[in-house]
Amino acid sequence: MDCYIILIFYELLEIHKTKNEKTLTSDSKINIDNIAEMMKYIEGNYAQTTLREVAKKFHFHPNYLSTLIKKTTGKSFKDIIHEQRLKKATTLLKSTDMSIEDISIEVGYNNQTFFYKKFKETYSLTPKKYRIKSRILLKEVSHETIYS
């Protein structure tokens, strides 16, 4: 009788192990299949999107999505949003004459002070100094190209 109980326990243990392996494989598939698509969505909607909105769109619980993004990218959802916003801000600073206030609003920062803080944390320059330096560099590169 004890042998049968041990055999049944062993079989249940194997079933549980197999089920957990399938779950891990399923999670890996979710990572591969959806993270790239989610990142593309975030890149296109960085100015106004929220974790809750992205979670709803991709049919995940917000907490699970937050963990999944952190585990896969090494960055939090907020960090990714700030990264995308600031990346777009640098493009606008280099290529337009928009005011810095308009740029901060355009990329999703309603608080200009917070925009300045995040920008300086990331680039070690204020947006205005970044614009000036990038334009000086652009002129130098253009000048070198013309006379090379």
Image: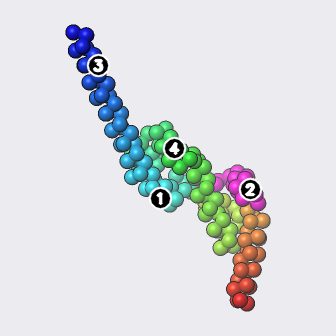
Q: Earlier in the sequence, mark 4 or mark 2?
A: 4
Left-right relation of 44 to 102: left
Q: Which of marks 1 and 3 is nearer the N terminus?
A: 3
- The N terminus, quarter of image: top left
Q: Which residue is drawn at 36% across and 33% down?
A: 20
The Cα atoms of the two marked residues, 1 and 2, are separated by: 26 Å
Q: Which residue is drawn at 45% across and 45% down?
A: 55
Mark 2 or 3: in front is: 3
As drawn, the label of residue 40 is 1
The type of residue carrying mark 4 is Lys
As drawn, the label of residue 9 is 3
The Cα atoms of the two marked residues, 2 and 3, are separated by: 60 Å
Residue 105 visible in the snapshot:
no
Callout 2: few (<14), some (14-19), or many (20+) C-alpha neighbours within 10 Å? some
Callout 4: few (<14), some (14-19), or many (20+) C-alpha neighbours within 10 Å? few
Label pair 4/3, CB-CB below 8 angstroms: no
Q: State whether the magenta stretch is mostly helix, strand or loop.
A: helix
Q: Is 6 rendered above or below residue 46? A: above
Q: Could you say which is closer to the camera, residue 65 or residue 73?
A: 73
Left-right relation of 88 to 133: left
- The C terminus, quarter of image: bottom right
Reading the image, the residue beneath label 4 is 71
As drawn, the label of residue 120 is 2
Mark 4 or 2: in front is: 4
Q: Which of marks 2 and 3 is nearer the N terminus?
A: 3
Label pair 4/2, CB-CB below 8 angstroms: no
